[in-house]
Image (spheres, helix red, strand yellow):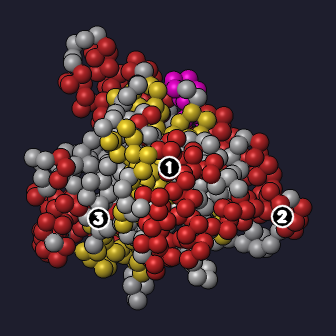
Amino acid sequence: MYQYDTLDKEFLADRAAEFREQVGRRLAGEITEDQFKMTRLMNGLYLQLHAYMLRVAIPYGSLNPVQLRALAQIGRTYDKGYGHFTTRQNLQFHWIKLADAPAILDALAAVDMHAIQTSGNCIRNVTADPYAGATAEEIDDPRVWSEAIRQWSSLHPEFSFLPRKFKIAITASAKDRTAAKVHDIGLMVRRARDGTLGFEVIVGGGLGRTPYVGPTIREFLPANRLFSYLEAVLRVYNRHGRRDNSYKARIKILVAALGAEEFARQVEAEWEKVGAAGDLPDTEIARIRGAFAPTSFDTLVNRSEAFEEAKAADPIFARWARNNLRPHKRPGYSIVEISLKGIGDTPGDATSDQMDLVADLAERYGQDDIRVTHEQNLVLPHVKLDDLAVVHAELRRAGLATPNVNLISDIIACPGLDYCALANARAIPIAQDIARKFENQDRAELIGELKIKISGCINACGHHHIGHIGILGVDKKGEEFYQLTLGGSGAEDAAVGSMLGPALPANRVAEAIDVLVDVYLRERQGEERFLDTVRRTGVAPFKEAVYADAH
């Protein structure tokens, strides 16, 4: 992974010292909360319902064991012994005391981490495929470009005070594991017929109050022209983006208002003005690429007798292998996805002890590499087939071996009203209720891929719009209700779901999901996924079944 140099380290130490001084002024009453707010937000510190929340940046979801252990220790020392992994591949601590925040930033800086630009109207953490460098599907390693964008965008003087927050995702595989099409900019790595590396550029996606799947504004952008083009996009946004209305300030609103064709025309005109001077030199990209040189793999065959024997001997291990392992580009290796969605657990939470265990496994069996997924799980991208049985045993002892990746209990959920001051309803208990309803693993596998996403408010931090089943918490005269949508997707076939019908009370949500599943199992044809069946039949048969008692 990329290693911070002396300049990076000095900058983080200076930034932490500066924040310590400002926190001291706030605690002493020398500045008001309003005067302090911008400073704390630009350092990732939010004031939520019960305490401060610190959002730690994990660029493109990549961690080493030293960093993960540091996060574990922060959780143990300054929080309640856990952290929450988010849909932007970041980590949040939800019980932070203001007086402790400077010490936490010091601890992060000591392991080349920070919380800069995890808030504010700036370019946020760039997300990328968590299987980067491990999957044979990818055209190029998206981490190279994600890191280059991180360096280019950090404290960029022109783009530090945009009309609204700005999010970029990069995927280099046909299978999109980043939800690129619902980002402000989605970059999909492509290769031209002559072998030239480039990007399909998607601009104006987003969720929240007005969800959009972003349109493609350039089918192919040569990779060496990426940064001048990004500059052109952001300049057009900075010039025309709404600053008078925060609800209409995202770039998706601008693209929709101008139309994709006109927006693209303006970007192309601005790009011509920026010119090649706006691009990074090839030597700089080569320098960054060197940090992601292929890991040193052993020469193995693509079959392990130990792995096959373990599957034959242990049905629990076999189920985990079936659901939580993915093919690796190298013979004899596997990608291991670690579910943070144990039945009854809070989706995305990991205890400090669990983080330490994953760090240990990465050191012993995973080439010091850990990833965070946008679906709130963890990944060990390089594990030998021979080692999978012992890795599984260790994960199982730590409560991290739930065999449910991409199944119905692998639920995305925001913190909701349990933590967030913006939320209208709780999301965590709903996720827990649904997971318990479908804890029978045989039935979960019979259902197959089904992505449920839950948000506690219209801001859509739980990505409910793009769930196969989406669940939105709403407030009705002080009571929590839940609006269901069907047919959304955040993958390469991205789509915004269709509303099912009137919102349901909390105690009916899990039951309604059970009804939806029964309709799917009755209606599906052949190997159809839940999403395929909904798209073929429409929502009518599902709606009729859920609201039958109302007629």
Rounded to the nearest angstrom, the CA distance separating label 3 from label 2 is: 43 Å
Element under disc 2: helix
Crowding at dot 2, Cα within 10 Å, few <14 / some 14-19 / many 20+, comes out as some
Query: In the rendered structure, which disc, 1 or 2, sits on the residue that comes first in sequence?
Result: 2
The residues tagged by marks 1 and 2 sit, at their Cα atoms, a distance apart of 38 Å
Q: Residue furthest top?
A: 28
Sequence order check: which comes first, mark 3 or mark 2?
3
Task: Name the residue that disc number 1 marks.
Answer: 508
Residue plotted at (33% across, 26% down)? 19
Q: Residue type at mark 3?
A: Tyr
Name the one closer to the observer, 203 or 446.
446
Residue at the (44%, 40%) spot, across then down: 426
What residue sits right under mark 2 in the picture? 311
Quarter occupied by residue 502: bottom left
Dot 3: what SS?
loop
Q: Secondary structure at mark 1?
A: helix
Q: Identify whether 233 is placed above or below 262.
A: above
The residue at 79%/58% (across/down) is: 317
The residue range painted magenta reads 69-79
Side of 62 where 334 appears, left or right: right
Amino acid residing under circle 2: Lys
Q: Position of residue 385 (x, y in %)?
A: 77, 63
Judge by depth and name the residue closer to the eye, 510 or 65: 510
The kind of secondary structure the magenta stretch mainly shows is helix
Query: Residue 508 location, x and y as percent?
Result: 50, 49
Q: Quadrant of residue 65?
A: top right
Identified by mark 1, the residue type is: Arg
Quick one: label 3, few (<14), some, or many (20+) residues within 10 Å?
Answer: many
Q: Which circle, 1 or 3, is nearer the viewer?
A: 1
Of marks 3 and 2, the one in the foreground: 3
Horizontal side of residue 72 vs 283, given as left or right:
right
